[in-house]
Image: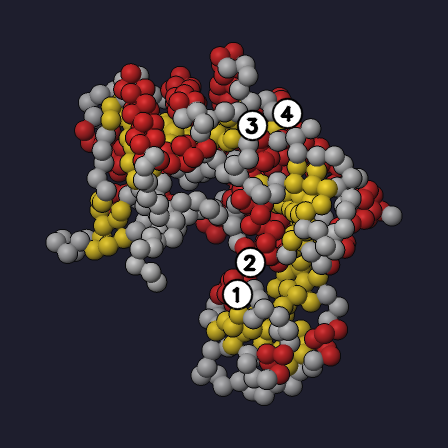
Amino acid sequence: MTALTLALSKGRILEESLPMLARIGLDPAGDIDRLLRVPSRTPGVSLLIIRPTDVPTYVEYGAADLGIVGKDVLMEHGSTGLYEPLDLDIAKCRLSVAAQKDAPKRDPRRRLRVATKYPEITRRHFADKGEQVEIIKLYGSMELAPLVGLADVIVDLVATGGTLRANGLIETEVICQVSSRLVVNKASLKTKHAEIAALLDQIRRAGQTLKAA
Amino acid sequence: MKKWMLPAGVEEALPPVSWQLEDLRRKLLDQYRKQRYELVHPPLIEHLDALLTGTAQDSEQQVFKLTDPDSGRLLGLRSDMTPQAARIAARHYRDRDIVRLCYLGTVLRSRTGSLGEPRSPRQVGCEIFGEAGIAADLEVLRLMLKTLKLAGLKKVHLDLGHVGIYRAVIAKLGLSVEDEAALFEIVQRKSHPDLAEFVSVRKLKPRVAKAISQLLDLNGGVDVLARARDAFPNASGEIDAALTALEKIVGELRTEMPKLPIHLDLAELRGYRYHTGMVFAAFVSGHGREIARGGRYDGVGAEFGAARPATGFSADLNELLRLGA
């Protein structure tokens, strides 16, 4: 069998992928807490454990044939350079706009300031509504920005809404629902078609069984 | 910024690579000359509107632009030599029924389509103008494979598609320009989940939704053609013609080159806006992008007063050298 490499998104997506991977014998056969590349229990398939935002890059360059990554990351990456055949229906959450619960009225002469780690999605979302906004790119703890007056609103992933509530923020708008997708390198699908088609089929069926359970 | 640094994505060649490039250039041009292709050297810079025709319709954002201080008109640096070849075929060879042109030279792109693509590829390509039949398609396919062989590339995979099928499927939908672009993007990503969402939001007819969804999965070995006949049992007109053309081409290629791995992908819409028929690309394992591409783009040259059928291929000489033996 031709060797395949599957890139996994470290963190919540990895945790939620493991049951599905175990079902089809692709669970890691090594210490995923320390190793960045581990073999899977299926010979010929190796796994990369990397930051979610790096998954599209690895797969688009062909350093990995396949990847599991959140729709949020794909939308921000914003290219047609990857195939995204499957919704794995795991790590579900939503991308939302949130604001301070009792925010002081904003000066209308100034553009809305939005703090986010998704500048592309944010720009597109507000542009679709016909609004030009000032985007402040942050790398973490978005919730803080409105509290200290750095931004008027934030655009961020919301799973339960707990962190928002704890910081006195409320969700004002849902941009889209997010779940994990399986992505495939375009050249890999063509040059290793039989192997990848078989794997896609297994993953699709494992997903259905797990959902039914 | 250090003065000696080159702009991002811009390369230069020094010995021994420069000599190897020159050797390969001669080898390829000798081959094309032997097959009676005329060599053309289109200009580096042209009026922008002339550059943005035919195969370059969607490359406006890729073109470096400047104003001509002489005429005040906008000029563009060539980002693709195919439309230039089409202009030359339409203007200078209009009295010939069939014209075969080849070209080789550096093109410049202000930005690239996918990650890791160079901004200054050395484009090499061949085009046939004036021949509508699959004989011409086969000729350019063979010539592309020959080009890859001369460059020493091993284990080349051929990917074949046909834009006519998708075009026929969505023809009657009457989608707005924006919706059509959105759907096209979804098909390019073979995203079943996004397609399902698009279908429900735009309330597409179940029959059309099913046809598009089937197209996304019509990829794989040559059995795809049989599966496509099953998926479109009463195919008539454009779909039937497209499948028949592909069947003939695959049949010919399998007899001639039984060892060539052929992959079919009926949702591959490379250059959808200007291609009109079969599209193809070549891949080698271990390289995440196509290494050569081409297809049929009939009707080209209309802007220059002589619309003709056309088909051709192009590749990047730098990349061929890098990936070749």
Is disc 3 surrounded by few (<14), some (14 to 19) or many (20+) residues within 10 Å? many
| Chain at tag 2 | A
Question: Which circle marks residue B127 in the picture?
Answer: none
Q: Secondary structure at mark 2?
A: helix
Residue B162, x across and y down, in percent? 49, 29
| Chain at tag 3 | B
Colour mapping used in the image: secondary structure
Q: Secondary structure at mark 1?
A: helix
Depth-wise, is mark 3 or mark 2 nearer the camera? 2
Question: Which circle marks residue A76 in the picture?
Answer: 2
Question: Which circle marks residue A119 in the picture?
Answer: 1
Q: Residue at x 29, y 20 (%)?
A: B30
Q: Amino acid at mark 1?
A: Pro
Depth-wise, is mark 1 or mark 4 nearer the camera? 1
Q: Residue at x 24, y 54 (%)?
A: B66
Quadrant of res B230: top right
Relative to residue B277, is residue B107 depicted above or below?
Answer: below
Label 3 vs 4, first from the N-terminus: 4
Whether tag 3 and tag 1 are in contact, CB under 8 A, the answer is: no
Gap in angstroms between the C-alphas marked 3 and 2:
30 Å
**Which residue in the structure is indicated by mark 4?**
B227
Residue B190, x across and y down, in percent? 59, 41
Depth-wise, is mark 3 or mark 4 nearer the camera? 3
| Chain at tag 4 | B
Whether tag 1 and tag 2 are in contact, CB under 8 A, the answer is: yes
